[in-house]
């Protein structure tokens, strides 16, 4: 990018052309940008695992075989839960549809007995339920059955879309692994040519933030899901593995895990297992408190060199702006901004 013989106007026109080409390329690849972002996140997050894996291979084509086999392993780890969840979701949808088809044509479904026997509120709850739900049950039943079929169709479409995104992610990930050494050299060199030597620190901080976020979010969420799976099984909840997997997925999003174990507690309570429901809520709240206030701040804060408040804001802002991949891109952006701010403060003090 060194252009000493060009005039100012020519340099300006060149950078404008580069900017337009980048914007045009991003617009053309807009449907594939989530897959590209996920591939970058996965490549950075698994770099510490890929290094010893690559060392196992020998020969001229060792990079090809290492990248191919490791991508397959990552694909299995990612696809297996989706397939399992899809099978369970379809099975549950079929069961729900069968129950609706065999349900009575009129009348509201019965409330759980423990709810009706609540002191002071039981009679009032039953009265409100009958007045607001009983009269509309027969009418809603006609519309509920087509809605279930429509819901099942939408779930299938979304599952296919997610699988196609995952396929492009794995394809991109393979080429990132394959060309990792070249990318490690070329990206910093081109960035230095465009923005100066200080940009290399921003790239390093961003990569460290992504790696720390992957460790703090994914590993802690997996641990939470595994622990809550055991809690659900002990409490006698239906489908403990499925609910545990859902809890693990929601645990990656701040403040979302209570939705999962709260729903399990409601299911248990509706079947009269009030003690088990309370136990699930207490265990879930305890695990969530320890994970969010002790484990995650240590893992993410130290790895990304960020106060956990900025990590939390980065995660929430990233989800709002970029979707699920924003969980990892948000803290990386915040790490780059904080690094830039610290460099400015240092320069102002020395100046």
Image (spheres, rainbow, N blue to C red):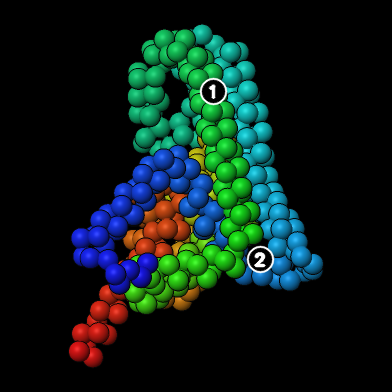
Residue holding disc 1 = 153
Q: Which quadrant does the N terminus fall into?
A: bottom left
The answer to which image quadrant residue 18 occupies is bottom left
Give above or below for 123 relative to 294: above
Identify which residue is drawn at 62% across, 70% down.
48
Q: How far across and down, in percent of the image, does residue 331 sit?
A: 40, 63
Pointer 1 or 2: first along the chain: 2
Which numbered marker is on residue 13?
none
Q: Is residue 254 visible?
A: no
Q: How far across and down, in percent of the image, does residue 223 sit?
A: 60, 60
Identify which residue is drawn at 51% across, 8% down.
105
Q: In the image, 299: left or right of 181?
A: left
Residue holding disc 2 = 50
Identify which residue is drawn at 40% across, 76% down.
201
Identify which residue is drawn at 37% across, 51% down.
22
Give above or below for 98 relative to 229: above
Of residues 164 and 228, the one drawn nearer to the viewer in this rendering? 164
Tally the numbered discs: 2
Q: Which quadrant does the C terminus fall into?
A: bottom left
Label 1 neighbour load within 10 Å: few <14, some 14-19, many 20+ = few
Label 2 neighbour load within 10 Å: few <14, some 14-19, many 20+ = some
As drawn, which residue projects farthest toward the front? Answer: 5
Q: Is residue 23 visible?
A: yes
Q: In the image, 170: left or right of 312?
A: right
Question: Which mark is in front, 1 or 2?
Answer: 2
Give above or below for 104 relative to 154: above
Q: How far across and down, in percent of the image, does residue 213 sit?
A: 48, 64
Q: How far across and down, in percent of the image, does residue 52 sit?
A: 70, 71
Disc 2, SS: helix
Disc 1, SS: helix
Spatial CA span between label 1 and label 2: 38 Å
């Amino acid at each position: 990018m060194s252009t000493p013989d060009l005039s100012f106007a020519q340099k300006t026109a060149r950078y404008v052309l580069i900017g337009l080409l980048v914007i045009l390329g991003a617009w053309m690849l807009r449907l594939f940008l989530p897959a590209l972002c996920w591939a970058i996140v996965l490549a950075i997050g698994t770099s510490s695992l890929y290094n010893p894996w690559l060392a196992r291979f020998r020969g001229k084509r060792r990079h090809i075989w290492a990248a191919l086999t490791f991508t397959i392993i990552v694909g299995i780890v990612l696809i297996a839960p989706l397939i399992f969840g899809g099978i369970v979701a379809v099975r549950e949808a079929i069961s729900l549809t069968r129950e609706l088809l065999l349900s009575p044509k009129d009348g509201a479904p019965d409330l759980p007995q423990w709810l009706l026997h609540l002191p002071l509120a039981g009679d009032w709850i039953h009265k409100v339920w009958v007045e607001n739900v009983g009269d509309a049950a027969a009418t809603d039943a006609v519309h509920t059955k087509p809605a279930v079929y429509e819901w099942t169709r939408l779930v299938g479409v979304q599952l296919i879309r997610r699988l196609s995104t995952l396929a492009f992610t794995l394809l991109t990930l393979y080429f990132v692994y394959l060309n990792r050494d070249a990318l490690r050299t070329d990206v910093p060199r081109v960035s230095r040519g465009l923005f100066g030597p200080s940009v290399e620190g921003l790239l390093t901080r961003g990569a460290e933030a992504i790696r720390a976020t992957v460790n703090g979010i994914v590993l802690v969420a997996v641990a939470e899901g595994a622990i809550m799976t055991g809690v659900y099984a002990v409490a006698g909840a239906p489908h403990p593995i499925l609910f545990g997997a859902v809890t693990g997925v929601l645990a990656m999003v701040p403040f979302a895990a209570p939705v999962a174990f709260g729903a399990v507690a409601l299911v248990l309570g509706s079947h009269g297992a009030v003690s088990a429901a309370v136990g699930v809520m207490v265990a879930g709240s305890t695990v969530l408190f320890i994970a969010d206030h002790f484990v995650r701040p240590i893992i993410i804060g130290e790895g990304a060199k960020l106060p956990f408040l900025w990590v939390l804001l980065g995660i929430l802002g990233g989800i709002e702006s970029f979707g699920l991949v924003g969980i990892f891109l948000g803290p990386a952006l915040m790490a780059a901004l904080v690094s830039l701010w610290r460099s400015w403060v240092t320069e102002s003090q020395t100046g």
